Amino acid sequence: MADRLYEAALVPELWTETCERLAMEAGSSTASIFTVDANGRHRYVTTPNIADLFAKFVSSDLRFQNPRPARAMQVSPFSFVRTSDILTEEEMQGDVIAREFLKPHGIDWEAGWAFQEPTGHVIVITLMRKAGLDNFTHEQIARLNDLKPDLARAAYMASRLAFNEARSMTETLSMLGLPAAVIGDTGQMIASNPEMEALSPRIRTGAGDRIVLESSGARALLDEAIERYKAQAAPTVQSVPMVSLRDGTPPLILHLMPVRRAARDIFSRSMAVLAVTQVGQVGPPDMRVLCGLFDLTPAEARVARGIAMAQTPEMVAAALGISLETARSHLKRIMQKTGTTRQAELVLLLSGLNTPGTGQGGR
């Protein structure tokens, strides 16, 4: 079981299978792991047999009325405990979580452990037994406590790897000469590279590590884009122009891109990458930049380069030896991925993607 936990910490796709193994080890009907941030936002992984219930729970405001995590950390901070041992009989009778979620789903008994990681997020491991079964035995709780050190270490490992992932993203974009920052799931900046820091005061961090832009118009657009990212399950690329308020400094384009990761990676705090390019540099954009920034296929990136060089779809099709219909199909997907609605907007956007020393790269 320990090996499975550490594998899941490295490969997030394995968390669902690991929950199934944990439930089997504990003689439980279900097993779930979820994190709660300071704003009450829940991220979770669970056995498939209770996935629908968890989806309903984490989207309901009733989750704020769940006394279990706080009570468990107060009463039993170092070990697994049954819910029946931390809530009074009166609390059990009036418990809205049991009434609205658990009982209708055929759940009678719960056991769990809650602890706080260094980032301030609370991690909760919870197991449930269906109606018709007895409550968790002392032996089953003891077995869970035997697994507790490995559960904690795997959770910490996953959390730290997620943080390091944010730093790695900005360092990778540094190699392409792009200023970049990673935006966390609450909209704060959690990592940035030296190129981004050099843009201060045009782009800087303010109170609560929020991104502050010198241009109020661009700031409003970026804030709006971040809010859309927080609300959408599959956000699109957003590009925000930022005019220069200082003589001799070029306009900037801010590209906000979703972090694509395993859907069940509950420990990752990264929501999006913010990359910045300057407008007005001469030359076609680097293929690596196009593919990396906008998740373009190689074929789409070649069409995008042609468009950036002011070629029409007919000219691109002829130059690449593809049909006009194919070129237009690629162009449509490129505009969807770059968040543009007109070809003129796309040309302006792509004109800022030639990074120093790589303008002819990818030919």
Image: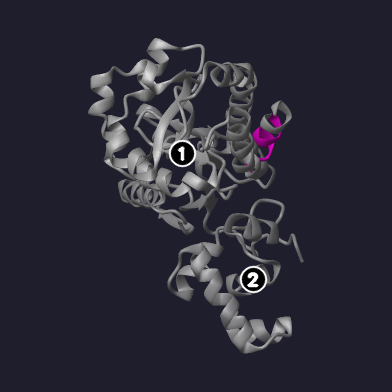
Q: Is 164 located above or below residue 303 in the figure?
A: above
Where, by quadrant of the figure, is residue 11 drawn?
A: top right
Majority secondary structure of the magenta segment?
helix
Q: State which quarter of the image contains the N terminus.
A: top right
Rendering coords of residue 243 (x, y %): 40, 53
From which residue to which does the magenta span run?
6-12
Where, by quadrant of the figure, is residue 325 drawn?
A: bottom right
Q: Is 137 located above or below residue 318 in the figure?
A: above
What's under tag 1, amino acid-wise? Answer: Arg
What's under tag 2, amino acid-wise? Answer: Glu
Residue that protrudes farthest toward the right in the picture: 363
Q: Is residue 312 visible?
A: no
Compared across the picture, whether 150 is left or right of 189 comes to right
Residue under the point 57% across and 80% down? 329
Residue under the point 55% across and 58% down? 352
Alpha-carbon distance for marks 2 and 1? 34 Å
